[in-house]
Amino acid sequence: MRIRGFKHRERREANGEKGGVSRLILLLFGLFAGGIAFGALMAGNGSAEAMGVLQSATSLFSAERASQPLFTTFVHSISASGSLLLLLFFCGFWAVGQPVELFIPLFKGLGLGMSMGYLYLYYHLKGVLFSLALILPQAFLSSLAIILAGKESIQMSSLLFKMLAGGRENAGGLSIVRLYCTKFMILGGMILLAALVDCVCTFAFARFFVM
């Protein structure tokens, strides 16, 4: 009976951890989606001066995409999402880094929403096609990597907080850190793949969208 009770308790704890992870991913995805929605609203309600700056920036961006070397596109794509991934990685070693870790997916969605909202507002169908061809393919992979990285970072910060607060023993610390680093290496691979997708899409479609 005691063994059975222990197994039931262990199963409940495992189910609770899985449920917590699922809720955390949903929270991060919700923040990302909320950032997209809020960014689109900001694009629609921006001042004429701000919209003029965005229009000039978009024209310059599309022209550069069509003419710049693919290696430059690759580096820019990695630096944009890779910097957020690195920030999440280091925040994971900060016991109270959860606010920053929650903000990063929101920030990622905000930038994506503003870009796509502006493109639709000023270029209509051409803006939609621009988003589908040059923004969304790499944004899907890089955003998924950022959301998963946010989950790992928050879990590591929470674990460190519990350890510092005395609520959990420091058991298997080295193996936990090794697993954390391995997961971020895999997520870094997703960022690299997103950059490669960005290059392919740029090579295939950028010349059709010089604005």
Image: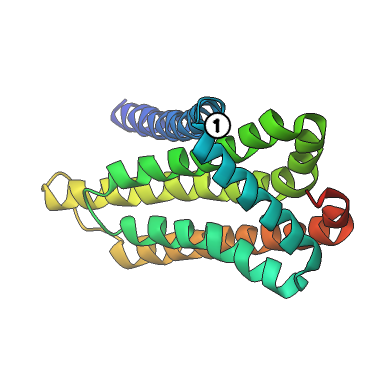
Residue 99 x %, y %: 29, 41
> For the residue marked with disc 1, what is the amino acid?
Ala
Task: State which quadrant residue 12 falls in.
Answer: top left
Circle 1 packing at 10 Å, graded few (<14), some (14-19), many (20+), is many
Q: Nearer the viewer, residue 7 or 60?
A: 60
Q: How many marks?
A: 1
Task: Name the residue: 51% across, 39% down.
Answer: 49
Q: Nearer the viewer, residue 121 or 191?
A: 121
Q: How is the image coloured?
A: rainbow
Q: Is residue 70 left or right of residue 38?
A: right
Task: Name the residue: 39% across, 34% down.
Answer: 17
Q: Is residue 170 left or right of residue 120?
A: left
Screen quadrant of the N terminus? top left
- Quick check: 114 above or below 142? above
Task: Name the residue: 36% across, 34% down.
Answer: 10
Residue 147 x %, y %: 51, 43
Task: State which quadrant residue 5 falls in.
Answer: top left
Q: Nearer the viewer, residue 40 or 169?
A: 40
Residue 167 x %, y %: 15, 44
Residue 56 x %, y %: 63, 50
- Quick check: 35 above or below 97? above
Q: Nearer the viewer, residue 157 or 17?
A: 157
Under circle 1, the secondary element is helix
Task: State which quadrant residue 192 falls in.
Answer: bottom right
* Residue identifier under label 1: 43
Task: Name the residue: 69% across, 33% down.
Answer: 122
